[in-house]
Image: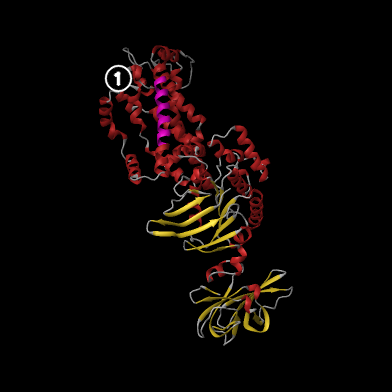
Amino acid sequence: MSGIELANVSKSFDTTEVIRGVSLTVDKGELGVFVGPSGCGKSTLLRMIAGLEETTSGRISIGDRDVTRIEPAEREVAMVFQSYALYPHLSVFDNMAFSLRLARASKAQTRDMVQEAARILQLEEHLDKKPAQLSGGQRQRVAIGRAIVRQPKVFLFDEPLSNLDAELRVQMRLELARLHRRIGATMIYVTHDQVEAMTLADRIFVLRNGMVQQQGAPLELYNDPDNRFIGGFIGSPAMNFLDGHVTAQNDAGIEVAVDGADGQRLHARLASKRVTGDRVTLGLRPEHLHPNADGLRVRMEMVEALGGVSYLHTRTPDGTELVVEYRGAQPPADSTGIAVGIDPANVVVFDSQGRRLR
Amino acid sequence: MTRTRKIENACLTAITMAAAVLWIFPLYWALVTSLRSEDHVVSRNAGLLPDQFNLSAYIDAIFNTQLVTWYINSIVTALIITLLVIVSGMMCAYALSQMRFPGRRLLYVVVLASFMVPSQALVVTQFILMDQLDLIDSWAGIILPQLIVPVVIIVYKQFFDAVPGEMREAVVLDGGGDYTLLFRVYLPLNRGITTALAIITFIMAWNQFFWPFLVVNSEAMMTIPVGITQVNDAFGVRYARLMAVALLAAMPVALAYLIFQRRVTEAVMISSGVKG
């Protein structure tokens, strides 16, 4: 297995630059996840690593080898596609053996490798079936098996669970995590689903407009976002944002008057100096907000009761939505007005451009 | 079912039956005639119903004409034409659909344009070309001009365009090139289309009369449809033998149609654009 390094990699289609100077490293044996909204360039970046898209500038290395201008088949990568891209006319065995036969592996070696992959993926009893006879989850496993038999240096997954239903997606997600732990391969996984990213990744790379906005361990990104976009993108339900202006500052932090909230104030820890009147945005995670008689008064709009936890959808006096996580069997009724508070240590502060203030 | 609807159905059935009788009667008459002796064919006693089972016309046709040679010529030329048309059409369509090169669109427009030129308009130039290449009265002379079948390219291109791009990428990552993709993935995937196109090309090549008639001079190089025109002698037309030759000539195509009926229908629909 080898790690992957991208150094200042860019990609343009005619005059449109879709990947802008991306530099990142996925260590050997690590599972890196590219996540971001549609059109952010995550799949393009993955295809560039696979060699399916030409790299306009920069360098892509797998292990110690510069593969930027090397043909896809010679990069020693295997890819699992969103549509699985199985060969419909071939059996499961022949699908998995396809690359080995092209590489002129011996019959015995081919049989052994396919059977080993089938054993890992619990596909042994399906080896004679055609892809059309399999369920979505089984097809996905065949696609992964096809990648495993090649013994690549790097596995690439392009939104592999998107075509599965919700229940199967959760199941396959766990299977993928187990598989990664078992074979310890370097993997890059592309998804637009941040839950998938959080649960699978050793390291997440959040992309937007062809640039990596932030990279790090899942909880690092969750707890310490570099900007407002990351704060809003990572986490479900998403982080709440309240705009306001600084009214006072001391050693402990700042006091912020929230816009349209009848002069109500919230406090946040902040080391950097601000001056009175500075515009800021406060980021509040739903689980950090809790009912507090002295807190921000909001009106309830709807309650999502999920059992052990409920989400209270509320609005501030000026109509900004605020989602509050409520732990307890009996959430407040829909029509109740409540007041919510938050520990200043849990408030994340962004400047008016959305950059993180620390 | 209403009364009007019943009458409508009865009328339609009657019309269809009448059309079927009209269509099948020449075949029936050819069969009945071919099984009669030459004398009986032209006698006053020969009625509409079959009254003899005489194979002499067939024996005569096989042993006293060059029927077997014409058969061989037809089989060889039709098979070669079918094979070359399918392989070259598929490869051309693959290039137009899957490969990126300058002039690709223009090339496709040329293919489409050639579809619009009737073959009769090219006969003179093709004849001169074959003459200059010294291919008159040869198999190559019969075969070469019949290799231009743009509809095969168009049908294959439509199919290749519809295959998801990820299939191609999977092959590329598995270490395969264009030939792997075409012959090990696309060809097995479109076996139905290939069979249908091959059958229709074979039937067209087998039935081709005009071009072989022009390009062939000697009886030894004739194909079956051209050879039939030679089945007469100095004493006039021998109807039983003529019908026997005609039936033997049509037999392979008729058999092919009977065996591959569904595929032939599919091929006609595909090549006429009814079905993609």
Badge 1 element: loop
x and y percentages locating residue A96 in the rendered image: 59, 41
Q: Looking at the magenta stretch, what is its main secondary structure?
A: helix
Query: Is residue B116 found inside the magenta-colored segment of the image?
Result: no
Residue at 59% in and 83% down: A251
Residue farthest along the right direction in this orientation: A329
Query: Is residue B75 found inside the magenta-colored segment of the image?
Result: yes
x and y percentages locating residue B58 in the rendered image: 44, 15
Magenta region, residue range: B72-89
B167 or A233: which is nearer to us?
A: A233
x and y percentages locating residue B272 in the rendered image: 41, 41
Residue at 49% in and 35% down: B263
Q: Residues within 10 Å of mark 1 (few under 14, many from 20)?
A: few
How many numbered dots are placed on residues in this image? 1
Give the quarter of the image for residue A119. top right
Residue type at mark 1: give it.
Asn
Q: Quadrant of the C terminus of chain A?
A: bottom right
Which residue is label 1 attached to?
B217
x and y percentages locating residue B27 in the rendered image: 44, 26
Residue farthest along the bottom direction in this orientation: A263
Which chain hosts label 1?
B
Q: Is residue B193 visible?
A: yes
Q: Is residue B177 above or below residue B234?
A: below
In the image, taking residue B164 as reference, residue B240 lies left or right, namely left
